Amino acid sequence: MNLDLKRGENTRAVSVNGSWVHQTRNGASERSGFVGTGDPNEMAIAWTTELLAKGWLFDELGLSDVKPGELTAVSRQLPCPSKLALRARPLDVIDEIAEFPALVALTLNGVTSKTDLAPISRLPQLVRLEISVGDARGVIGAVPELPALRAFSTDRLNGIDTGLLRRFQGLERLSVASAQLSNLSFLAEAGLPLRELELHWLDVSSLSLRPVEAIAPTLERLSIWLRDVAVTDAHAIGRCQNLRSLKLKGVAVPPDALGALAKLTSADLDDAVPLAPLGGLAALEQLTLSLPEDKEPARDGVKALVGNTRLKIVFQQRDWSAVDLEKNLTETFELFELLASKGAVRSARRIKTKEGGASAPAHFGGGARLATGEAWPHCKNCERPMPLFVEMDLAKLELPTKVAGLLQMFYCNSTEPLCEVDCESWKQNDRAMLLRVVPATVETAAVEAPELPQPVAERSIELGAEKADSPDSQDAGDRYGIYDAPDRTLGGDKLLGWPYWVQGNEWPSCPECAKPMDLLLQMQSDKGIAHQWGDSGHAYLFLCFDHPTRVGFVWQGC
């Protein structure tokens, strides 16, 4: 149970966590109590009652894994909040929301096709409804007519029912996230006077934005965030000439479409959007930018904004004027050119993964290729088999020098005992890990992974396009004497490039030539491998390209 209260701009919350009840004020802890064998919900209600007596207003009630009768019990002890959030599977307490007739906002997490949503019709003042689907089919039952409804949000639906939307004739705000859609035809068919539209992370391979034109006369706020979607008819955005706010991620908009948005006051854009057309938008007051790794074209776009002296640009979590940002980008590009002239810019390739793929040249998890008669490697700490984390056929990768052999990393991820801590596996050792290059002359055969305490899912490694990768300021200073290097080191899973250090550089040296090894593979927590390197850190595999049987390993957490 979580109870939120407000008074002016101040907030208070009373929450239940197991047998503990916590009270906070403006996010800071105020008091805590251990209930023991008592009912923590009763203590939470008592504390909330104290605050209500002091003039605080009951703003929102949130219940997780709510049980039948629990809502009714709360309604008899506390006044009706303005907002209610129910999170449970199955969600079988909908009929009890009639106990809160004055609700203006309702969040339902765990709705399925079997959930009876008819009781929502007993909420005559409901203005905002949020529904998150709780089954794999992504469908919901019929939602009743709600005359006062102005905002509807849905998550993980399998398609949008136009008939459902037609029940909400006063709807002004629609948010659709993580839905499986074939098109946006419902925007034209529902005939709604939408002022705000959000389309986020849709499960679709291609999408036409032409239907957005149907709501152009009323649309004031548009937010479209997509990933790996082929977008067509993006010029339709330019016909929404009443837009005041625009957020785009993964959507390339024609320059003339952007230039037509004369009323635009706020924009949040990524590197798929050209900046130069924004220079003619006199109403633009705030611009949030995610710029490409190659910032030279971006600098030219920012130059076009210099004439707008009212414009505030949010970039890298800082506020800039267009003049200051253009100057910063110029200095950054000049430093990058200096690094490139010294050979400090390396080529790196982002990594994507797909399920399966032990036969791929490189893969995370799953089975491994072992020499004839070789036993699966075991941890020397817990004496149990270690999962394979990485296997890479070096000859089939595009490396700076021709290298042959099979790089393998077996790593013990046991939690009882916690072997990576016991053996200090953040630096290479031979107790809870095995990191090696098996020579190409050794005959190997595919072996399935044995039963493991913590198996690692098998995922093939697919390499993306080459990206320019430069050292961080510490490496640039140590190696090249450039101490103000721009922060352009690529984080995440990648092949080659420079390490995206979490806690400062920590290069292993080759035991044969004593030179720092080169980065071969960088792994981010819970990306290609479902493993946490410390607290949301990175792990780094190194190889000496002059002595390619010599490998190194480090991981760093926050």
Image (cartoon, rainbow, N blue to C red):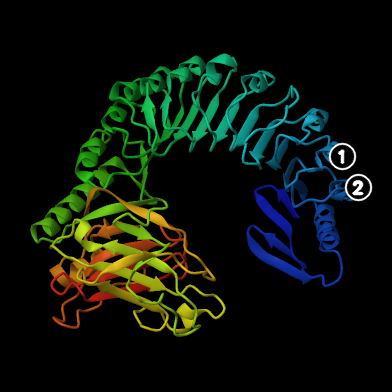
Residue 19 lies, with reference to residue 377, above or below; the image says above
Q: Distance of mark 2 from mark 1, alpha carbons?
A: 9 Å
Q: Residues within 10 Å of mark 2 (few under 14, many from 20)?
A: few
Location of residue 153 by image quarter: top right
The image shows residue 115 at horizontal and vertical percentages of 76, 36
Q: Position of residue 315 (x, y in %)?
A: 35, 47
Quarter of the picture containing the C terminus is bottom left
417 sits left or right of 359 in the view: right
Question: Circle 1 sits on which residue?
Answer: 99
- Which amino acid, by three-letter code, is at mark 2? Arg
Secondary structure of the residue carrying numbered label 1: helix
Instruction: Point out the residue furthest to the left here.
Output: 341
**Residue for point 46% across, 16% down:** 213
**Quadrant occupied by the N terminus:** bottom right
Does the rendering let one see residue 507? no
Task: Point out which mark residue 67 bears.
Answer: none
Q: Looking at the picture, does residue 301 appear above or below residue 543?
A: above
CB atoms of marks 2 and 1 within 8 Å? yes
- The residue carrying pointer 1 sits among few (fewer than 14), some (14 to 19) or many (20 or more) residues within 10 Å by Cα, namely some
Name the residue rendered at 45%, 80% in the picture. 379
Residue closest to the eye, 413 or 333: 413
Disc with the residue nearer the chain's start (2 vs 1): 2
Give x and y (percent) for residue 325. Answer: 27, 46
Q: Helix, strand, or loop for circle 2?
A: loop
The part of the image, by quadrant, that contains residue 131 is top right
Closest to the observer: 498 or 479? 498
* Label number found at residue 76: 2
Q: Amino acid at mark 1?
A: Glu
